[in-house]
Amino acid sequence: MFGFSPAKLLFTALIIAAVWYGFKWLNRVQENQNKKPRQPTQDSSANNRAEPSAQDADYEELVACSKCGDYVIADKKSGCGKEGCPYDK
């Protein structure tokens, strides 16, 4: 009943090999999908136009206030609002 027959050993080896090669195949498919650039569909491209991308976003440089350490916009020279701030208008 619990003996090791050649048929049982061969069957077990085939099952292990099938699982092993199945995982290898799945990993290869996932790597290929990650390498391909995604083609946007019409629905997703309409959504992308409504929202600005990171490249289109406006960024402003910040500098630390020497009095309190708060960060303020460098170009506008708008201060932190505290007394003695060097960046107040």
Image (cartoon, rainbow, N blue to C red):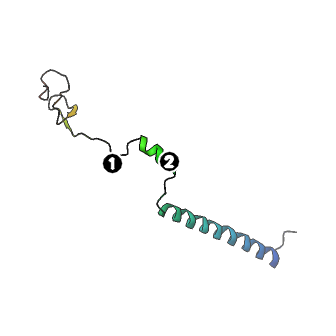
- Could you tell me which secondary element the residue under label 1 belongs to? loop
Residue 23 placement (x, y as % from top left): 62, 65
Name the amino acid type tagged 2. Ser
Give the farthest residue toward the right: 1
Return the residue nearer the eye: 21 or 61: 61
Residue 30 placement (x, y as % from top left): 55, 62
Name the amino acid type tagged 1. Gln
Q: Is residue 23 left or right of residue 1?
A: left
Residue 16 placement (x, y as % from top left): 70, 70
Q: Is residue 36 above or below residue 5?
A: above
Return the residue nearer the eye: 65 or 74: 74
- Could you tell me which secondary element the residue under label 2 belongs to? helix
Q: Is residue 19 above or below residue 84?
A: below
**Identity of the residue drawn at 41% across and 41% down:** 51
Residue beneath disc 1: 55
Instruction: Report which quarter residue 60 is drawn in.
Output: top left
Instruction: Report which quarter residue 15 is drawn in.
Output: bottom right
Q: Is residue 68 left or right of residue 15?
A: left
Closer to the camera: disc 2 or disc 1?
A: 2
User: For the residue carrying disc 2, how many other residues have a C-alpha within 10 Å: few (<14), some (14-19), or many (20+)?
Assistant: few
**Identity of the residue drawn at 64% across and 70% down:** 21
In the rendered image, which quarter contains the C terminus? top left
Residue 73 placement (x, y as % from top left): 21, 34
Residue beneath disc 2: 44
Return the residue nearer the eye: 71 or 37: 37
**Identity of the residue drawn at 88% across and 69% down:** 1
Q: Is residue 16 above or below residue 60?
A: below
